[in-house]
Image (cartoon, rainbow, N blue to C red):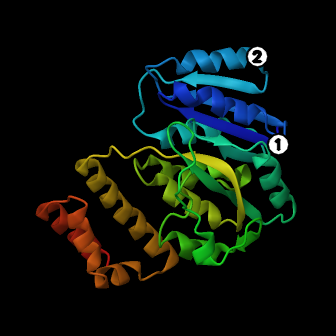
Amino acid sequence: MPLVSVILPNYNYSQYLKQRIDSILNQTIQDIEVIMLDDCSTDNSLNIMEQYQKQDARIVAVVRNQTNSGSPFQQWSKGIKMAKGKYIWIAEADDYADRTFLETIIEVFSKNKNIVLAKSSSHMVDETGTLLNKDYDHWKSRGLKPDSVCLYDQKQFAKMQYMRNHIYNASCVVFRRDAIKDTFFNDLSYHFSGDWLFWTHIGTEGLTAEVNKRLNYFRFHESSTTHTGAYKAFLEDIEILSIMQKEFDTNFFQNLWRKHKLFRRLKRMGFDAIQIQTIKGKIKENL
Protein backbone atom coordinates (compact mmCIF):
# COMPACT_ATOMS: atom_id res chain seq x y z
CA MET A 1 0.00 0.00 0.00
CA PRO A 2 1.47 3.39 -0.94
CA LEU A 3 1.80 6.02 1.75
CA VAL A 4 0.05 8.73 -0.32
CA SER A 5 -2.41 8.54 -3.18
CA VAL A 6 -2.12 11.62 -5.37
CA ILE A 7 -5.24 12.38 -7.41
CA LEU A 8 -4.66 14.71 -10.34
CA PRO A 9 -7.96 15.90 -11.87
CA ASN A 10 -7.57 17.83 -15.10
CA TYR A 11 -9.61 19.61 -17.73
CA ASN A 12 -7.84 21.53 -20.50
CA TYR A 13 -4.81 22.51 -18.43
CA SER A 14 -2.15 21.08 -20.73
CA GLN A 15 -0.09 24.28 -20.43
CA TYR A 16 0.39 23.63 -16.70
CA LEU A 17 0.48 19.82 -16.61
CA LYS A 18 4.23 19.26 -16.92
CA GLN A 19 5.01 21.64 -14.07
CA ARG A 20 2.27 20.06 -11.97
CA ILE A 21 3.29 16.45 -12.66
CA ASP A 22 6.98 17.22 -12.08
CA SER A 23 6.13 18.84 -8.74
CA ILE A 24 4.36 15.61 -7.72
CA LEU A 25 6.95 13.10 -8.92
CA ASN A 26 9.85 15.12 -7.47
CA GLN A 27 8.45 15.24 -3.93
CA THR A 28 10.96 14.27 -1.26
CA ILE A 29 8.48 11.59 -0.21
CA GLN A 30 8.58 9.05 -3.03
CA ASP A 31 6.18 6.42 -1.63
CA ILE A 32 3.22 7.56 -3.71
CA GLU A 33 0.76 6.38 -6.32
CA VAL A 34 -0.56 8.87 -8.87
CA ILE A 35 -4.06 8.67 -10.33
CA MET A 36 -4.57 10.99 -13.30
CA LEU A 37 -8.14 11.82 -14.30
CA ASP A 38 -8.91 13.75 -17.46
CA ASP A 39 -12.40 15.17 -17.85
CA CYS A 40 -12.59 14.85 -21.64
CA SER A 41 -10.09 17.63 -22.38
CA THR A 42 -9.98 19.04 -25.90
CA ASP A 43 -6.27 19.95 -25.71
CA ASN A 44 -3.28 17.57 -25.57
CA SER A 45 -3.59 16.86 -21.84
CA LEU A 46 -4.18 13.14 -22.33
CA ASN A 47 -1.05 12.78 -24.44
CA ILE A 48 1.07 14.46 -21.77
CA MET A 49 -0.38 12.20 -19.06
CA GLU A 50 0.21 9.05 -21.07
CA GLN A 51 3.81 10.03 -21.84
CA TYR A 52 4.52 10.48 -18.13
CA GLN A 53 2.86 7.15 -17.31
CA LYS A 54 5.26 5.37 -19.67
CA GLN A 55 8.19 6.87 -17.77
CA ASP A 56 7.10 6.37 -14.14
CA ALA A 57 5.46 3.26 -12.67
CA ARG A 58 4.08 5.26 -9.77
CA ILE A 59 1.46 6.64 -12.18
CA VAL A 60 -0.93 3.73 -11.70
CA ALA A 61 -3.84 5.06 -13.75
CA VAL A 62 -4.67 7.54 -16.49
CA VAL A 63 -8.43 7.66 -16.94
CA ARG A 64 -10.23 9.84 -19.47
CA ASN A 65 -13.95 10.55 -19.33
CA GLN A 66 -15.74 10.03 -22.63
CA THR A 67 -17.88 13.08 -21.90
CA ASN A 68 -17.17 16.09 -19.71
CA SER A 69 -18.67 15.67 -16.22
CA GLY A 70 -19.25 19.39 -15.75
CA SER A 71 -17.94 19.24 -12.17
CA PRO A 72 -14.44 18.71 -10.77
CA PHE A 73 -15.95 17.13 -7.66
CA GLN A 74 -17.13 14.11 -9.64
CA GLN A 75 -13.48 13.55 -10.55
CA TRP A 76 -12.51 13.86 -6.89
CA SER A 77 -15.06 11.22 -5.98
CA LYS A 78 -13.81 8.82 -8.65
CA GLY A 79 -10.19 9.28 -7.60
CA ILE A 80 -10.87 8.80 -3.88
CA LYS A 81 -12.65 5.53 -4.59
CA MET A 82 -9.67 4.35 -6.66
CA ALA A 83 -7.07 5.39 -4.05
CA LYS A 84 -5.18 2.81 -1.97
CA GLY A 85 -2.88 5.09 0.05
CA LYS A 86 -3.10 5.88 3.75
CA TYR A 87 -3.30 9.57 2.84
CA ILE A 88 -4.88 11.36 -0.12
CA TRP A 89 -3.71 14.53 -1.85
CA ILE A 90 -5.93 16.09 -4.53
CA ALA A 91 -3.36 17.94 -6.61
CA GLU A 92 -5.25 20.17 -9.00
CA ALA A 93 -3.77 20.35 -12.47
CA ASP A 94 -3.08 24.08 -12.66
CA ASP A 95 -1.31 24.34 -9.29
CA TYR A 96 2.13 23.10 -8.19
CA ALA A 97 3.96 22.38 -4.94
CA ASP A 98 7.23 22.80 -3.12
CA ARG A 99 9.28 19.58 -3.13
CA THR A 100 8.87 19.27 0.65
CA PHE A 101 5.09 19.69 0.67
CA LEU A 102 4.24 16.05 1.38
CA GLU A 103 7.19 15.50 3.72
CA THR A 104 6.19 18.47 5.87
CA ILE A 105 2.49 17.57 5.97
CA ILE A 106 3.04 13.85 6.65
CA GLU A 107 5.41 14.71 9.49
CA VAL A 108 2.57 16.66 11.13
CA PHE A 109 0.27 13.63 10.81
CA SER A 110 2.94 11.40 12.37
CA LYS A 111 3.04 13.50 15.53
CA ASN A 112 -0.67 13.15 16.34
CA LYS A 113 -2.74 10.11 15.39
CA ASN A 114 -5.98 12.10 15.83
CA ILE A 115 -5.27 14.43 12.87
CA VAL A 116 -7.50 13.58 9.91
CA LEU A 117 -6.81 16.60 7.69
CA ALA A 118 -3.82 18.90 7.31
CA LYS A 119 -3.30 21.92 5.09
CA SER A 120 -0.40 24.19 4.26
CA SER A 121 -0.46 27.88 3.41
CA SER A 122 -0.11 28.98 -0.21
CA HIS A 123 1.66 31.34 -2.53
CA MET A 124 -0.69 32.88 -5.08
CA VAL A 125 0.54 32.94 -8.67
CA ASP A 126 -0.97 34.13 -11.94
CA GLU A 127 -1.25 32.27 -15.24
CA THR A 128 2.46 32.85 -15.94
CA GLY A 129 3.64 31.76 -12.47
CA THR A 130 4.33 35.30 -11.26
CA LEU A 131 3.81 35.71 -7.51
CA LEU A 132 0.76 37.82 -6.68
CA ASN A 133 0.23 40.16 -3.76
CA LYS A 134 -2.75 38.15 -2.53
CA ASP A 135 -3.07 36.49 0.85
CA TYR A 136 -5.78 33.96 1.62
CA ASP A 137 -4.10 32.73 4.82
CA HIS A 138 -4.21 36.02 6.77
CA TRP A 139 -1.42 35.15 9.19
CA LYS A 140 -1.10 38.70 10.53
CA SER A 141 -4.77 39.38 11.19
CA ARG A 142 -5.19 35.94 12.78
CA GLY A 143 -2.07 36.27 14.93
CA LEU A 144 -0.32 33.28 13.32
CA LYS A 145 3.44 32.86 13.17
CA PRO A 146 5.27 31.49 10.12
CA ASP A 147 6.24 27.80 10.44
CA SER A 148 3.82 27.26 13.32
CA VAL A 149 1.20 24.50 13.36
CA CYS A 150 -2.32 25.11 14.64
CA LEU A 151 -4.64 22.29 15.69
CA TYR A 152 -8.44 22.60 15.67
CA ASP A 153 -10.86 20.15 17.24
CA GLN A 154 -14.14 19.23 15.56
CA LYS A 155 -16.16 22.11 17.02
CA GLN A 156 -13.47 24.71 16.38
CA PHE A 157 -13.05 23.68 12.76
CA ALA A 158 -16.79 23.51 12.13
CA LYS A 159 -17.17 27.03 13.53
CA MET A 160 -14.42 28.28 11.24
CA GLN A 161 -16.02 26.59 8.25
CA TYR A 162 -19.55 27.89 8.63
CA MET A 163 -18.23 31.42 8.52
CA ARG A 164 -16.51 30.71 5.19
CA ASN A 165 -14.60 27.91 3.51
CA HIS A 166 -11.11 28.28 4.97
CA ILE A 167 -9.79 25.59 2.64
CA TYR A 168 -9.71 27.73 -0.46
CA ASN A 169 -7.67 25.32 -2.60
CA ALA A 170 -7.67 21.51 -2.59
CA SER A 171 -4.01 21.37 -3.59
CA CYS A 172 -2.88 22.54 -0.15
CA VAL A 173 -4.68 19.68 1.65
CA VAL A 174 -3.83 16.10 2.60
CA PHE A 175 -6.38 13.93 4.39
CA ARG A 176 -6.59 10.42 5.77
CA ARG A 177 -8.42 7.96 3.54
CA ASP A 178 -9.95 6.16 6.53
CA ALA A 179 -11.63 9.42 7.59
CA ILE A 180 -13.94 9.32 4.56
CA LYS A 181 -17.44 8.04 5.23
CA ASP A 182 -19.67 6.90 2.39
CA THR A 183 -22.07 9.77 3.11
CA PHE A 184 -19.30 12.30 2.41
CA PHE A 185 -19.49 11.45 -1.28
CA ASN A 186 -22.92 13.13 -1.30
CA ASP A 187 -21.10 16.42 -0.64
CA LEU A 188 -19.29 16.05 -3.93
CA SER A 189 -22.56 15.94 -5.88
CA TYR A 190 -22.77 19.73 -5.58
CA HIS A 191 -21.51 21.72 -8.55
CA PHE A 192 -19.99 24.83 -6.94
CA SER A 193 -19.54 24.36 -3.18
CA GLY A 194 -19.22 20.63 -2.61
CA ASP A 195 -15.66 21.03 -1.35
CA TRP A 196 -16.84 23.38 1.43
CA LEU A 197 -19.11 20.70 2.91
CA PHE A 198 -16.68 17.87 2.16
CA TRP A 199 -13.79 19.45 4.08
CA THR A 200 -16.10 20.35 6.96
CA HIS A 201 -17.35 16.78 7.28
CA ILE A 202 -13.82 15.34 7.24
CA GLY A 203 -12.98 17.75 10.05
CA THR A 204 -15.72 16.22 12.20
CA GLU A 205 -13.79 12.93 12.25
CA GLY A 206 -10.84 14.24 14.26
CA LEU A 207 -8.35 17.08 14.47
CA THR A 208 -7.48 19.49 11.66
CA ALA A 209 -3.94 20.82 11.35
CA GLU A 210 -3.02 24.13 9.74
CA VAL A 211 0.66 24.29 8.77
CA ASN A 212 1.64 27.93 8.44
CA LYS A 213 4.24 27.42 5.78
CA ARG A 214 3.74 28.36 2.11
CA LEU A 215 4.34 25.04 0.35
CA ASN A 216 1.57 25.22 -2.24
CA TYR A 217 1.37 27.41 -5.34
CA PHE A 218 -2.26 28.25 -6.03
CA ARG A 219 -2.85 29.39 -9.59
CA PHE A 220 -5.17 32.37 -9.61
CA HIS A 221 -7.22 32.90 -12.76
CA GLU A 222 -9.08 36.11 -13.44
CA SER A 223 -12.72 35.27 -12.89
CA SER A 224 -14.85 34.76 -15.95
CA THR A 225 -17.91 33.65 -13.99
CA THR A 226 -21.13 35.07 -15.38
CA HIS A 227 -23.76 36.68 -13.17
CA THR A 228 -25.90 33.61 -13.77
CA GLY A 229 -23.10 31.34 -12.59
CA ALA A 230 -22.40 33.50 -9.53
CA TYR A 231 -26.11 33.53 -8.71
CA LYS A 232 -26.35 29.72 -8.89
CA ALA A 233 -23.23 29.42 -6.73
CA PHE A 234 -24.72 31.78 -4.15
CA LEU A 235 -27.92 29.71 -3.94
CA GLU A 236 -25.82 26.57 -3.51
CA ASP A 237 -23.84 28.28 -0.73
CA ILE A 238 -27.10 28.94 1.10
CA GLU A 239 -28.04 25.27 0.79
CA ILE A 240 -24.62 24.25 2.15
CA LEU A 241 -24.98 26.66 5.07
CA SER A 242 -28.45 25.31 5.76
CA ILE A 243 -26.99 21.80 6.13
CA MET A 244 -24.24 23.09 8.41
CA GLN A 245 -26.72 25.00 10.54
CA LYS A 246 -28.75 21.84 11.16
CA GLU A 247 -25.74 19.64 11.79
CA PHE A 248 -23.77 22.03 13.99
CA ASP A 249 -26.63 23.88 15.73
CA THR A 250 -25.62 27.40 14.69
CA ASN A 251 -27.59 30.62 14.31
CA PHE A 252 -25.72 31.60 11.16
CA PHE A 253 -28.75 32.75 9.18
CA GLN A 254 -30.06 34.96 11.99
CA ASN A 255 -26.71 36.73 12.02
CA LEU A 256 -26.64 36.93 8.24
CA TRP A 257 -30.12 38.50 8.13
CA ARG A 258 -29.09 41.19 10.60
CA LYS A 259 -26.19 42.21 8.37
CA HIS A 260 -28.20 44.12 5.78
CA LYS A 261 -25.02 45.20 4.04
CA LEU A 262 -24.99 41.70 2.55
CA PHE A 263 -27.88 42.62 0.28
CA ARG A 264 -26.21 45.87 -0.76
CA ARG A 265 -23.19 43.81 -1.73
CA LEU A 266 -25.37 41.57 -3.86
CA LYS A 267 -26.38 44.60 -5.91
CA ARG A 268 -22.74 45.49 -6.47
CA MET A 269 -22.16 41.92 -7.64
CA GLY A 270 -24.64 42.55 -10.44
CA PHE A 271 -27.59 40.51 -9.19
CA ASP A 272 -30.96 41.87 -10.28
CA ALA A 273 -33.94 42.58 -8.01
CA ILE A 274 -35.59 39.21 -8.65
CA GLN A 275 -32.37 37.32 -7.88
CA ILE A 276 -31.84 39.29 -4.66
CA GLN A 277 -35.43 38.61 -3.56
CA THR A 278 -34.92 34.90 -4.23
CA ILE A 279 -31.75 34.91 -2.13
CA LYS A 280 -33.57 36.73 0.68
CA GLY A 281 -36.34 34.15 0.51
CA LYS A 282 -33.89 31.26 0.75
CA ILE A 283 -32.24 32.85 3.78
CA LYS A 284 -35.58 33.51 5.50
CA GLU A 285 -36.54 29.85 5.02
CA ASN A 286 -33.68 28.95 7.33
CA LEU A 287 -34.32 31.50 10.08
Disc assigned to residue 269: none
Along the viewing direction, whichever of 279 and 81 lies nearer the viewer? 279
Q: Which residue is mark 2?
A: 55
Cα separation, mark 2 vs mark 1, equals 21 Å
Disc 2, disc 1: CB below 8 Å?
A: no
- Residue drawn at 72 percent across, 25 percent down: 60
Residue visible at 62% across and 60% down?
202
The kind of secondary structure element at disc 2 is helix
Q: Is residue 108 above or below residue 249?
A: above
Amino acid carrying label 2: it is Gln
Does residue 155 appear anywhere in the picture? Answer: no
Q: Residue at x 35, y 65 (%)?
A: 238
Number of other residues with Cα within 10 Å of mark 2, as a class: few under 14, some 14 to 19, many 20 or more:
few
Q: Quadrant of the C terminus?
A: bottom left
The residue singled out by tag 1 in the image is 3
Residue 64 position within the rendered picture, expressed as x and y whole percent measured from the top left: 53, 22
Instruction: Say which quarter of the image contains residue 149.
Output: bottom right
Mark 1 is on which residue type?
Answer: Leu
Please indicate whether residue 117 sits to the left or right of residue 129 in the image.
Answer: right
Q: Position of residue 45 (x, y in %)?
A: 54, 21
Residue 50 x %, y %: 64, 16
